[in-house]
Amino acid sequence: MKKILIVFLVFVTTYSHGQKKQADSLPFQKDVKFKYESLILPAGLISYGIFGIKNDPIRQWDRDIRTSLEPDGVKIGIDDYSVVAPILTVYGLDLAGIKGRNNLLDKSIILGTSSLFMYSTVRLIKNNTSVRRPSGRSVSSFPSGHTALSFLAAEFLHQEYGHLSPWYSIAGYTVATATGFLRIYNDKHWFSDVLAGAGIGILSTKIGYWLYPFIKNVIFKNNIKESHVNLQIAPLYNGNELLLATSIRF
């Protein structure tokens, strides 16, 4: 129990600190420029999870962590809802008049692009792997979709408001890390599932921001006006996984 708590604490502290530096370097820049070094962390997390599917030492580490948590059937269901907390925070701050890096329309298209990439990636991997959940209930354990969405949301909050205060980034990644921990504690996922999900979530949001200049300037050609937008965002839970439904009408 102590080992996994230390791992998660070190992760969120280190990454949030690194994210603060990145945000400070882009205080007024709306478009996030592609940087190869931004791929290092998410690629490392995803690679660890993929290698862990057939790697005995990593699988043993997964089992040791599960054993240390002593699963007893008592669950903490907040992880089904905490996944979208950073996203709701972004829109709540915007409605409160605290403007982020992008306006409502821009951030919504970015979020939609990121969510589409994240969901497609998670489903593709789940459909082509057969990793049994710790509880033994299914073979769709890898990667963790809840964790992917929670880290997508944390990176989204960081990109929009991290340049205003590092506490936005720290808060978002703390919630995401807690969600990942609860996925393990609730016997839903292995540690490697959660790490891979975190990597996919972070990468998905970064891709959304990297692609947005192309989407805006080439596909929409800057003809969209925010005043003509009707935006609806709602979390959906189907009993097995949490989905984020986004509707944008022009």
Image (cartoon, grey):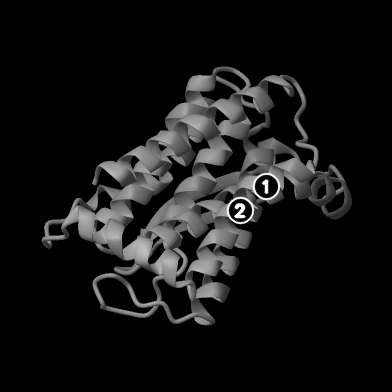
**Residue designated by label 1:** 40
Residue 240 image position (x, y, % from top left): 33, 69
Residue 19 image position (x, y, % from top left): 60, 30
Residue 221 image position (x, y, % from top left): 87, 47
Residue 112 visible somewhere in the drawing: no
Residue 81 image position (x, y, % from top left): 32, 49
**Residue designated by label 2:** 44
Asked whether the beta carbons under mark 1 and mark 2 sit within 8 Å of each other, the answer is yes
62 relative position to 202: left or right: left
Q: Residue at x 43, y 29 (%)?
A: 171
* Above-or-below relation of 226 to 199: above
Could you tell me the amino acid type at mark 2? Answer: Gly
Q: Residue at x 68, y 27 (%)?
A: 22
Q: Residues within 10 Å of mark 2 (few under 14, many from 20)?
A: some
Q: Residue at x 58, y 46 (%)?
A: 230
Q: Secondary structure at mark 1?
A: helix
249 relative position to 150: left or right: right
Could you tell me the amino acid type at mark 1? Answer: Ile
